[in-house]
Amino acid sequence: MQQKKICMLGAFAVGKTSLVRRYVDSIFSDAYLTTVGVKIDKRVVTVGDQAVNLILWDIAGEDDVSAVRMSYLRGASGYFLVVDGTRAATLDVARSIQRRAEDEIGSVPFTVLVNKLDVREEWTVTDGDLAELERAGWSVMLTSARTGEGVEAAFCALTERMFRPSPAAC
Amino acid sequence: MSVPPSPRGSASDVDEQAPNGDRLANLLLGIARYVDPAAAPANLAPGSDPSLDALRHILLDRELQVLARVRQTLDDPERLAKAVGEVLPLAVLRSAGRDGRLGEALAPTVERATQSSIRKDPRTFINILSPLMGPTIRKSIAEALDGTLQSLNQALKHSLSWRGLVWRIEARRAGTTFADVVLRHTLVYRVEHLFLIHKESGLLIRHVAADDAASGDPQLVSGMLAAIQDFVRDSFGRSGDTGLDTLRLGDQVLWCEQGDVAFLAAVIRGTPPETLHGTLRDTLLSIQDEWRDALVSYDGDDAAFAGVDDRLRTCLQAQAKPREQRLSPFLWFLPLLLLVLAGHWLYERRNDQRRFDRYVERLQAEPGIVVTGVAKRAGVWRVTGMRDPLSVEPTTLLAAAGLTPAEVDGHWQPYLALDPALALRRFQTSLVPPPTVSLALDDGEIRAFGSAPHHWIERARGLVRTLPPGSPALDLSRLEDPEMAEYERVRRAVQSHVVRFDHNVPKPAGDQETEMDTLAEDLRELERVAHQMRVTARVTVTGHADSTGKDTPNLALSLGRAEVVRSMLKARGVDPDLLAVRGAGPLEPLKPEATDEDRSINRRVSFTVGIGD
């Protein structure tokens, strides 16, 4: 059985936990996030003909008083940087976290998830911002934790990149 | 490595004579002949063709030069060492990655080198090993001490109990130590889960569980365990191989053994022995040794770790609770019987105590009894105190309290109680009142009611006078004395009698016979009453004379008149001892004498009744 560790990173209250909640098997309560700073969930996907357990480390969001505990990233095969589309500042947080993540675990696949697609009209993250990210070679996907839009695809895409060059079919 | 033979002289000649194009054409022709004998002259033997050598020279010229350089390198030890030194690290790395043969080949040499180094200067190795050995030895000693303390604690805890005694016998029979037996009986545990977790990523490498042991998703659990390890390490600023050792939740305990690439988490129910730490660590180390490469390059694929499960299962130990021996119904009955007997004994004892308390209560309530001490010795109650002899006999109270005389031993000091009830009893005992008298307690005082013979009343009065101060008094004022009343009546009757005399005559006047008879009768009555009262009556018979004549003869006459009356009364059956005579002469006249009538009244004999000894 193949396992991969994936981390959910991002500013405080961007919807990391909501994004995985509808997507995973979970045995731990959200209280772990505020106590230990991480909550671990699991999602089984199929890559080719092989089942893969994605172990999702939902890491407590970063805010002014507490930084992301980088030791939780060790051994991760990929990570999501979640951004709240309605709060442009969370994009800066994501950039900052990405730099620190790369320092900690090196270059591993990651995807920026711009969340809250269901309220697109309220977004302050502009298309220009997204284009800039893509120019920098970042993978950017738009999601809505509320409607589930884009979530499945985002997980598939990241898993696929982790297993490259093997073909992914999930 | 061989060097090709040098071309022959003839071939060199051809080379030098013909231009290069012709030389190559000739050579090709020769080769063709050589390959196909039909197209070649038969006199040419294979290998001896000089043109072939020439061709080799043309084609392999550069390689021959390289070979020559290699040969020089090989022949010169200095250059050879330099060349090998450059590739050796890479070669060793590759070889180690492929299989273990290099290790096997090097092992004897390394061992010899190590031995030689240690012989030469052990300090080098001590310096190398001490950072590694120090913590390991410390940890090992700490665990051994923990184990010893654990066994000591258990042994102490159970050393004085009944179960402890049984185990002591068991230890002696089995020829083992008491502590071992205690541990075996008390450390009931079961290793329920083992998680082999990749240290860096927190991914679960392998998980084994005891049958029927339940837990959440092992992959999630192991992730969380790793996260908590990181959390604790980060929070307390520790790094390296340290981490959470032990977590306890109710009767479950989680033990973590830290390795350098993996850690082993064991979920144990119950109280495991400290020695289990050693087992877990040994298992982890052996797994790390055997699967080191796979562990170092672990990327989430656990295919390489199939054999690990068997290794882990050796740690799924359990110490079962010793099977309780099934008791026969009789053995169940025995404690029940004992319980009933004990209950009965307790009930009896309590009852016994209660009965005795009741007895003492009754004793205390009795006037004239003071209990000063109680005790129970050898099944017999002992009561000590003071008791008025007239109080109730203590043994008579036993039956009412439900006790038998054999159960109680009384020790009583006699004393006189001033209690009114006791005083009443004492009066009754000492005075023996006649049936007509009743003694009773009335408002805290003892009173006598009814009527009593005079002598009894006198005796009671005498007793009352001699009572000690503070004693309850006996009130006799309400007691009637009928004898005294009778006496008074008779006394008055006797004293009312007057015997008349004629002038200067000692004998009573002639008309005084009847008077004398009734007088004698009254005196006899007095005699009887006095006898009845047990007193001695005294009747003084006083003779009187009138004042005519001289005093001296009048005195003699009056005494004579009294004596005559006594004689006459004696003659009428009156005891003469009752009567005392005296002559008053004319000194005690009834009336002043103015007339003969007055003088006649004064001439008389009168009677005075008294009670005397």
Image (cartoon, grey):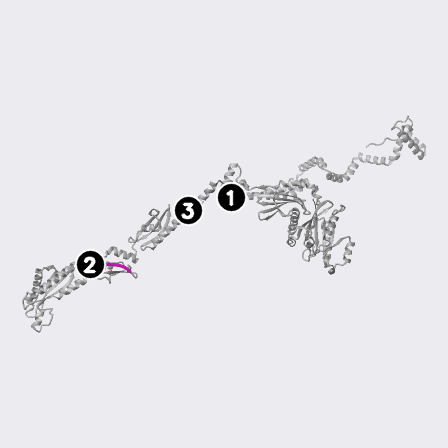
Q: In percent of the image, x 52 and y 36: which residue is there?
A: B174
Instruction: Work out whether disc 1 and disc 3 sit on a shared chain.
Output: yes
Structural distance between the alpha carbons of marks 1 and 3 = 32 Å
Looking at the picture, tell me which residue is in the foreground, B382 or A24: A24
Q: Earlier in the sequence, mark 1 or mark 2?
A: 1
Q: Residue B419: where, in percent of width, then height?
A: 30, 57
Q: Mark 3 points at which residue?
A: B344
**Residue B145 in view of the camera:** no
Tell me the kind of residue under disc 2: His
The secondary element bearing badge 2 is classed as: helix
Mark closer to the observer (1, 3): 3
Label 2 neighbour load within 10 Å: few <14, some 14-19, many 20+: some
Q: In this view, does B362 lie to the left or right of B63?
A: left
* Residue A31 position by quadrant: bottom right
Looking at the rendered structure, the kind of residue marked 3 is His
Q: Residue B381 placed where, x, y %?
A: 36, 48
* Residue B373 circle label: none
Tell me the chief SS of the magenta region. Answer: strand
Q: Name the residue under label 1.
A: B158
Label 1 sits on what residue type? His
Chain letter behind tag 2? B
Q: Is residue B437 covered in magenta?
A: yes
Q: Give the position of the N terminus of chain B as an image quadrant.
A: top right
Where are the magenta residues, as a range? B436-441
Residue B388, x across and y down, in percent: 30, 53
For disc 2, the marked residue is B455
Count of numbered tags = 3
Examine the rendering and report whether any part of residue B571 can be seen. Answer: yes
